Amino acid sequence: MSKNHFTTIAMPALNEEGHIRQAILSILPDPAALDYEILVLDGGSQDRTVEVVQDLAAQIPNIRVVENPRRLQASAMNIAARQADPRAQYMVRADCHSSYPPKFVERLVDCLERTQASSVVVPMNTQGTGCLHSAIAATQNSMLGNGGSAHRHVAKSGFVDHGHHAGFLLEDFKKIGGYDESFSHNEDAELDVRLNRIGRGIYLDADLAIDYYPRSTLSSLASQYWKYGSGRARNFIKHGTTPKLRQVAPLLALSGVTVGILAAPFIPAALILPVSYIAACMLSSAFLALRNREPCLTLSGIAAIVMHMSWALGFASTFSSHWTQKAARNIATRAAQ
């Protein structure tokens, strides 16, 4: 890797005083190996996030805070691309809730150079502290929670359709117009659809797994997965792509639970549908707890149910709203003719 390959590290932030210092320190490249800058895109933090970053910037002048008035990660990354140093060839997307392995940025740049990919993505290893938090983390790391998504476990390196965003060839990022800022969630998967169409591909580097710290309460987990499901629906609507089995599964689970509950007053046997689903999740969590010898992981079944139902409800709500509005527009158009 040549030192003259300048890299912009973009870190969207909002009220991250408890995480951001460690995140920045863990991702700092060796200045002897790489020329870089770190842009912290702050969405109007009300805590000490900006102060913490400015304290670090006093010691490390490569760091600066940039305002992100729209407060979205998509807009933060687009601002970073526009305000990147003119020398920048690569852009790294960093997360305040992650901890990065040694020489993470240097190895990302090396992988981008070696593969000539438009983007390099990495696996995520979710970590938790405390009983419920650990259960949520274990669920997101498991097949029950991630459905076998390549970037949710340490997988084999190679070209993929989608993964956790880490490094970009800045030229290609700008060529496709960056992130779609109408997406508050799932903006990464939406961008990957367009990025795959320009020909260089997306490469998963299995050797660059990062630690990620998930939501710590069921309510915040539900809100997050509702938005994920809604964003995925918008992605399908925009690009007309076909859902994968792991994305269909939560919708089938929601359908089964709904039909079982609504039909139960007339056909009591219909309760077998929601009961079977809940039992499967709880048995899976019990197995996970036994395998890891960690009783708290029995809560992973509850976390899985929250994730599945919230994702499916977010997807179904957005998808049905789209088709309802489309049908109303068609009726109005025919009536006007």
Image (cartoon, rainbow, N blue to C red):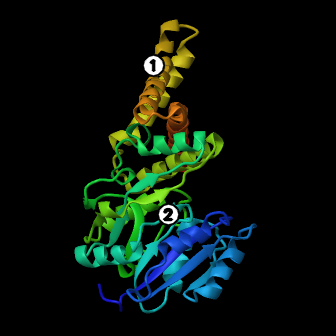
Q: Residue at position x 46%, y 58% from top?
A: 211
Q: Residue at position x 41%, y 51% from top?
A: 236
Q: Is residue 83 above or below residue 75?
A: below
| Residue 99, label in figure | 2
Tell me how far mark 2 sits from mark 1, CA to CA: 38 Å
**The residue positioned farthest toward the right in the image shown:** 46
> Is disc 2 placed on a helix, strand or loop?
strand
Q: Which residue is mark 1?
A: 276
The mark lying in front, picked from 2 and 1, is 2
Q: Residue at position x 58%, y 86% from top?
A: 60
Residue 46 image-quadrant placement: bottom right
- Foreground residue, 151 or 26? 26
Q: Residue at position x 50%, y 43% from top?
A: 315
- Foreground residue, 22 or 247? 22
Image x and y of residue 260, in percent: 51, 18
Q: Is residue 266 above or below residue 222?
A: above
Amino acid type at circle 1 is Ser
Image x and y of residue 104, in percent: 40, 72
> Left of 228 or right of it: where is 47?
right
Whether residue 176 is visible here, answered yes or no, is: no
Assign the N terminus to one quadrant of the image: bottom left
Asked if marks 2 and 1 touch (Cβ < 8 Å), the reply is: no
Q: Is residue 302 above or below residue 159?
A: above
Image x and y of residue 271, in percent: 51, 14
> Left of 104 or right of it: where is 303?
right
Image x and y of residue 27, in percent: 48, 73
| Residue 173, label in figure | none
> Left of 264 or right of it: where is 124?
left
Q: Residues within 10 Å of mark 1 (few under 14, many from 20)?
A: few
- Foreground residue, 291 or 166? 291
